Image (spheres, helix red, strand yellow):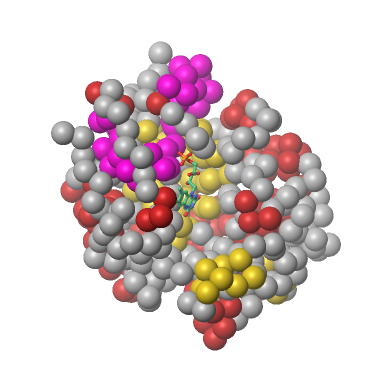
Amino acid sequence: MTTLFDPLAAGRIALTNRIVMAPMTRSRALPDGSPSPLHPTYYAQRAGAGLIVSEGIWPVPTGKGYLGTPGLYTEAHVAGWKAVTDAVHAAGGRIVAQIMHSGRIGDPSFLPDGEIPVAPSAVRPKGRSYTLAGMRDHVTPRALDAAEIPGVIAGYAQATQRALDAGFDGVELHAASGYLPMQFLSSGTNLRTDAWGGSATARARFIVETLDAMAGVAGPDRVGIKLSPEMAFNDISDADPVDTYGTLVSAIGAKGLAYLHVALFGSPTDWHALLRPRFRGAYLAGGGLTQASATALLAEGRADAAVFGAPFIANPDLPTRFARGVALATPDSSTYYAGGEKGYIDYPMAA
Ligand SMILES: Cc1cc2nc3c(=O)[nH]c(=O)nc-3n(C[C@H](O)[C@H](O)[C@H](O)COP(=O)(O)O)c2cc1C
């Protein structure tokens, strides 16, 4: 019977256990988008995970969705991330970079020259951004011209090269949580009538071509993807998610990708049963898991690995705690996105 403590090959990435640390934005990057001097410590403390997925990282300056989020665009960014990957590797871990373009989620004040955020269509999201001038309503995004889309995709390929230069073990396409790839995928945010919108196949095209571009740089076996079907976060919706996600995962399932991470947030649909058979590669399940529910998912053969987010914040040595049956600490959500060292690198290891 497969357990959380068995090794796993996810493409070219060799995990020593099946407990994966979820990508988590912590909003502690330097103003230029470089990782801070605290980043190597934070990630190295969590190197006992079978795999760490970094916080979302913008591939191009126009992809930045939040204050304090990091980039992978300049030489300084690469140097900052190299310190992180070196620290994780020295501690025996593996780490992939989550490439995150926020699309319509964000604020002009985060972007160069106060640009309007871009999206597949000019559909304004409900919601607000925390800016230096306080909370501000999201603006109506600018619909990308078809001629611009290959350039956006090229940004992901360039970030993939930067990630490899920085020593990451691979890259993950953030296609969840209502950001740019999910905006293309979902019928509520993609109203295009050209080759990038309309049918599920056309709406999936941005993700398919972006994965191809990333795989062209890293090899498909070092590229993963995160999806969150039926997640309503960031005002995203889809008229027929079973068709949309079935079509997408069938289109990418045989590319030889390292893994597919499906994060679920209370949806009644049995997404793991629907999507896993369509995907050749490691299948990672996440969203509100406990040690018990994750153990059951693996034992029942419903997933190859389990992804934990919030539990890794307050329990840097989560796999050790699971193995020893140590009670888990509760994270302080007031320090999720602020607080410097506090709530970031000061959670103790279990004795
Ligand atoms: C503080 C915080 C920041 C997050 N940032 C990201 C992110 O940058 N990228 C992403 O894909 N998901 C992000 N998530 C979602 C997690 O990756 C994960 O899917 C979610 O927390 C569910 O797992 P959990 O119930 O084990 O926490 C974040 C979650 C938390 C708690």
Classify residue 288 as left or right of residue 117. left
User: Residue 295 sits in which quadrant?
Assistant: top left
**The C terminus lies in quadrant:** top left
Residue 189, image quadrant: bottom right
Residue occupying image coordinates x 80% and y 62%: 192
Q: How many marks?
A: 0
Residue 88 appearing in the image: no
Whole-percent x, y for residue 152 in the image: 59, 68
Residue drawn at x 43%, y 22% as measured from the top left: 292
Please name whichever residue, 202 or 320, is drawn nearer the observer in this view of the structure. Answer: 320
How far from the left and from the top, in percent, is residue 74? 38, 74
Q: Would residue 299 be counted in the magenta stretch?
A: yes
Taking depth in this image into account, of 166 and 124 the one nearest to the observer is 124
Left or right of residue 5: residue 25 = right
Seen at 70% across and 37% down, the residue is: 246
Eyeballing the image, is 33 above or below 173? below
Quadrant location, the N terminus: top left
Measured as percent of width and height from the top left, residue 269 is found at 68, 30
Q: Residue furthest left?
A: 351
Residue 185 is covered by the magenta coloring: no
Q: Residue at x 37, y 33 (%)?
A: 19
Is residue 294 shown left or right of residue 38? Answer: right
- Toward the bottom, the furthest residue is 113
For the magenta stretch, what is the residue range?
292-321
Q: Position of residue 294 (x, y in %)?
A: 45, 26
Quick check: can you spot residue 43? yes
